[in-house]
Image: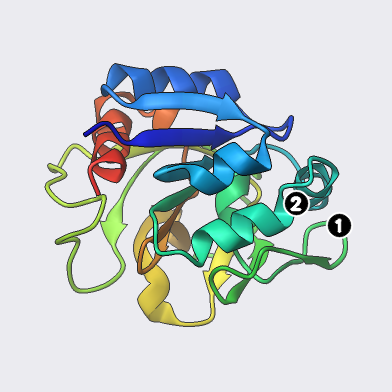
Amino acid sequence: MSRKVVVVDYGIGNLLSVTRALARVGADAALSNSPNEVGAADRVILPGVGAFGDGMAGLAAAGLTDTVKRYADRGRPFLGICLGMQMMLDTSMEFGSHAGLGLIAGTVVPVPTTTSDNKPHKIPHIGWNRLTPAGDSWNSTILEGLSDDRDTYFVHSFMADPTDPAHRLADCDYNGRRVSAVIRRDHLYGCQFHPEKSGPVGLRILQSFVAL
């Protein structure tokens, strides 16, 4: 049976790129800003680029904040991408303090501005970086079966810091600094990188999400 994947359209993010990537892995995907369609979906993806406060304001203006929260409470798979991942947490420190969706306990904090040797490095963190396990196993997750070739594409200045370390599924190393790359709580996932821009690895991750 086909599983309907709805990409939440709240005016922010690589909406068409995500939808096209889903089509490439055979998903029945559609953009929608309808609370009814989002609520009835089998899978929901929340993309996003830009500032945290703008993202939460856009979601509220579209009347989708409570819809997304209710969907996440129903036990169906959910994936936040980049800003969408950050919005899953409780709060963000970006340009002040902003409340998030509260789907995974934690705070969005700045990516460290120095290397592990306390030398300045580039912010935002842009480019390809390798996913590394943050816990014991990727079995039965959207990262299961990834080969050693698991570089993904990042563009961000802030990162998720979950309260419970068990909610960190994968990290990447940015000049000696540990950056959260994938977070997870039960059926809820967040990817800091852009799977839709991460070539075969990203498509594999999206395919695994659709197949959950």
Q: Residue at x 42, y 26 (%)?
A: 29
Q: Tell me the number on the disc at residue 108.
A: none
Find residue 171 and report its horizontal and vertical position in percent.
38, 59
- Residue located beneath label 2 in the image: 52
Residue 23 located left or right of residue 30 = left
Residue 172 located left or right of residue 70 = left
Q: Quadrant of residue 70?
A: bottom right
Q: Quadrant of residue 110?
A: bottom right
Q: For this rendering, which residue is in front, 95 or 9? A: 9
The type of residue carrying mark 2 is: Phe
Q: Earlier in the sequence, mark 1 or mark 2?
A: 2
Q: For this rendering, which residue is in front, 123 or 82? A: 82
Q: Residues within 10 Å of mark 1 (few under 14, many from 20)?
A: few
Q: Residue at x 71, y 63 (%)?
A: 100
Q: For this rendering, which residue is in front, 64 or 49? A: 64
Q: Is residue 189 above or below residue 147?
A: below
Residue 162 in view here: yes
Q: Is residue 52 above or below residue 196?
A: below
The quadrant the N terminus occupies is top left
> How has the structure been colored for display?
rainbow
Find residue 161 and report its horizontal and vertical position in percent.
55, 70
- The tally of labels here is 2
Instruction: Report if the CB atoms under discs 1 and 2 are less than 8 Å apart.
Output: yes
Q: Tell me the number on the disc at residue 95.
A: 1
